[in-house]
Amino acid sequence: MPDSPAPTRVLVLNSGSSSLKYQLLDMRDHRRLAQGLVERIGERTSTLSHTSLVGTEPAKREREGRIADHEEALNAVSEELSADGLGTDSPELAAVGHRVVHGGKLFSRPTLVDDAVEREIERLIPVAPLHNPANLTGIRTARSLRPDLPQVAVFDTAFHTTMPESASRYAMDIATADEHRIRRYGAHGTSHAYVSREAAKLLGRAEEDVNVIVLHLGNGASAAAVRGGRCVDTSMGLTPLEGLVMGTRSGDIDPAVVFHLVRNAGMSPEDVDVLLNKKSGLLGLCGDNDMREIIRRTGEGDESARLAFEIYIHRLKKYIGAYTAVLGRVDAVVFTAGVGENAAPVREAAIAGLEEMGLALDGDLNAVRADRARLISPEYARVAVAVVPTDEELEIATQTYALVSGVDDTSSATRADN
């Protein structure tokens, strides 16, 4: 009898503390077969929104009712997939790819999950207390439901492990830093990896020949300097708090502000943590963390919104300038994620005044709304400016499938017990 064809589907899971986001992709043509989101896991009323993409038109379904935990959530997802003939018990499913926010120094590539890997992800919880526990819950749930299926962890920090020590080290006592794993790890790595590679394609050049500055601008925001496909610097640090102004995070701030608030405002370290992560950024400056609303309010003459926008842009310009210096030669500045892809005024303001650096925008091209990668700079510009929609789920699926199928060099995968 002829051998059955090798499985080609990858289920991508992104587990939050009370949510589970998923996509099922066929890696033969990168086609999405289904996607969905389970929200409010563990609360009185949970929701599952599922979209099947196997027909001529997307078919959407929703269900409500209490979903007690992630195991129950994944079972519910499996039921929805089975209703479309795409169940998690299908022999066509090659692997499950898991987004994991923090991989520390050890995990620099997609990694087959075993007990040792689980223990290391758990050991990293102190440096990613909001994300790694939820990511780990998703991994353990999927392993218990399909112990025979390869589970692959794809780390947000992995792309940034190529940073030199001069970029990843803080200037503090080195023994203390090493003991407590204090260094710059970055985040949004799957997005920066995907976008920088797609930007090279857009320019019609090999990835290893292109230097790009990627601006991932969503509610969370980060910049990365990418030389020849390798990250050499990024704006987020030990945690996602460092760097650009974000929706609710302050970004760069004098660390002595923390001591000042503890000593003089009577705030606890936990109070300061909440202030800088959840009550700062755009929200703290003008009471709104939605860039669309801030742009609207600015147009209506709202001074607090105008100031928030200007601080946001000022920080962006600083990083564009800094990363131009780090790279030496820049071939493209690339905008991505929700704000980067959709907010033309942000792109216009960020590039304005940088003509001496070879940057310019074409106003008509910048105003176009599209879901494809595109150049928005005039032909004469020495440095291209582009918009590249990010696709973190596709990047996770691609890395996962390359590892388990042998399409890529599987020796590049790491295991915690090596």
Image (tube, helix red, strand yellow):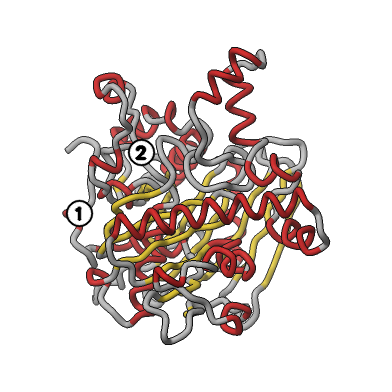
Residue 141 seen in the current view: no
Q: The C terminus lies in which quarter of the figure?
A: top left
Q: Residues within 10 Å of mark 1 (few under 14, many from 20)?
A: few
Is 259 drawn above or below residue 99 in the view shown? Answer: above
Type of the residue with mark 2: Arg
Q: Which residue is mark 2?
A: 184
Check the image and name the residue furthest to the right: 300
Q: Quadrant of residue 102?
A: top left
For mark 2, give the secondary structure: loop
Q: Is residue 15 left or right of residue 148?
A: right
What's the residue at 78%, 51% (across, down)?
Answer: 303
Q: Which residue is mark 1?
A: 412
Type of the residue with mark 1: Ser
From the top left corner, tell me how far across and down residue 223 is, in percent. Answer: 44, 54
From the top left corner, tell me how far across and down residue 256 is, in percent. Answer: 50, 24
From the top left corner, tell me how far across and down residue 242 is, in percent. Answer: 47, 40
Q: Quadrant of residue 91?
A: bottom left
Is 271 drawn above or below residue 356 in the view shown? Answer: above
What's the residue at 35%, 65% (across, down)?
Answer: 212
From the top left corner, tell me how far across and down residue 109 is, in percent. Answer: 28, 50
Say which of 14 and 248 sits in front: 248
For mark 1, give the secondary structure: helix
The mark that comes first in sequence, 2 or 1, is 2
Say which of 366 and 24 sits in front: 366
Is 82 drawn above or below residue 285 in the view shown? Answer: below
Q: Is residue 296 left or right of residue 374?
A: right
- Camera-nearest label, 2 or 1: 2
Is 245 drawn above or below residue 173 in the view shown? Answer: below
Check the image and name the residue furthest to the bottom: 379
Residue 329 seen in the current view: yes
Q: How far apart are the alpha carbons under marks 2 and 1?
A: 23 Å
Q: The N terminus lies in which quarter of the figure?
A: bottom left
